[in-house]
Image (tube, helix red, strand yellow):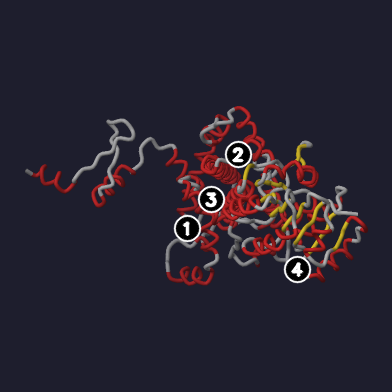
Amino acid sequence: MKADIGLIGLAVMGQNLVLNMIDHGYTVAVYNRTVSKVDAFVEEANRNDALIGCHSIEELVEALQKPRKIILMVKAGSPVDDFINQLVPLLEKGDIIIDGGNSHYLDTIRRTKFLEEQGILFVGTGISGGEEGARHGPAIMPGGSKDAWPLIKPIFQDIAAKVDGVPCCEWMGPDGAGHYVKMVHNGIEYADMQLISEAYHLLRYYMKLDVDQISDIFAEWNQGKLKSYLIEITSDILKVKDEDGLPLIDKVLDAAGQKGTGKWTAISSLELGVPTTLITTAVYQRFLSALKDTRVEAASKIKDVDHEEITESSKIDEDFINHLQEALYASKIVAYSQGFQLLSQASKEYNWDLNLGTIALIWRGGCIIRSAFLNKIKEVHDQNPHFEHLILETFFLKKVEMALPSLRKVVMKALSTGIPVPAFAAALTWLDSFRSKYLPANLIQAQRDYFGAHGFERIDYPRGTSFHVNWQEKLKTMKK
């Protein structure tokens, strides 16, 4: 009996995807470089003929139905290329290699071109939802060789999360489109997590609430417009106590890690000229958080307001909590708006023809940023598929206008008390800049023309008409 699909890489994500596929009636052949892991997994899974353990890549290829479909669940970078190079001599035209890791989209573009030249189809697919999602239904974002999609679509949509019966999986576009969409998903995730952590920080250090009170606040928020996976798990995290009965969160080191997708999002936004200021701030905050020892030293040397010594009542201030909820909602709109603007620009740059409504649809379930909020983005797209900017669409425009005063109050209160809220502040300053009829960029252009003769446009001439002034000579002439 031949397997429907093969998988290389039996870390937890790979194992859970295999079990998910088997649960949906597929036979899966598996291989891992450490062969003992194959045997241990097959024995533990105990799935009889539905799971075929292989001790070599050759054995894996031989175990598959044609056209062969092989998923790579290995570390991004050279390990992906290494396995591709091992597989190519063993495969035939029309076979499919699927990279299910968090690979950089430019690598996916390169690999698609290389493999299609060999007659082999390649799919770079984003998979979101972590270990639980892989096991019970992730959001899946495939892109690459379009001819591969009809062959893998049944499997992918069967194992994906479902919302209202709709699979959280759809074809994204050619070459690197799938991995790019997943990258931007992660960039928005960085922003969302940073905003939530700052809201927690304000409740903890400004309002002086205990973690149980804060957990209840997040649980209440999760019943309304902020309903989302990240809000839900935040409430859960704050309930957990260590062996000594104290909150476990208070013992977690305040140094955040990352795997690169947020950084790639920030780099891409710079390359494409899209100001994803909130997402980029969230990335930088992870870098800053990692400087734990330096921050401790700076805390002892740079004297100003010390938020840890501010005396506040532990009484719950419902008014401030409501402002904070609105501030979080407005900032979340900014994060998504920036992310979708980046997707739109990348689609034009790489000729991907991304469907932003479909992306919002598949992000509703399975993935880390899943939330009720995404339904509204899908509705906006359905009404206006070619919207210029999400935040200018009627629904989001009204929500931001209503929440902007609360966001301003929260940021001002935090800044005046020394509590860092860089993500909230980034959302506010982006909004203030975005809605400004005039910005001081005219002075920047004048400076550039003064020292570098870069030229400038004038407000009293049509756009695109360039002028240059010898500023020093003009000053001399004026003095005469």
What is the number of the mark on residue 33? 4
Q: Kindly report the distance in space between the C-alpha atoms of the residues bearing marks 3 and 1.
A: 22 Å
Q: Is residue 269 above or below residue 403?
A: below
Residue type for callout 3: Ile
Question: Is disc 1 placed on a helix, strand or loop?
Answer: loop
- Quarter of the image for residue 52 reads bottom right
Which one is in front in this view, the residue at disc 4 or the one at disc 2?
A: 4
Tell me if 452 is positioned left or right of 162 in this view: left
Closer to the N terminus: mark 4 or mark 2?
A: 4
Q: Is residue 224 above or below residue 26?
A: above
Specify the label residue 354 is tagged with. Answer: 2
Disc 4 versus disc 2: distance between alpha carbons?
Answer: 36 Å
Q: In this view of the protein, can residue 216 be seen by the observer?
A: no
Which mark is first along the chain, 1 or 4?
Answer: 4
Point out the tag, 1 or 2, that comes first from the N-terminus: 2
Please provide percent x and percent y for residue 397. Answer: 53, 33
Residues under labels 1 and 2: Cα distance?
42 Å
**Amino acid residing under circle 2:** Leu
Q: CA distance from mark 2 to mark 3?
A: 20 Å
Q: Nearer the viewer, mark 1 or mark 2?
A: 2
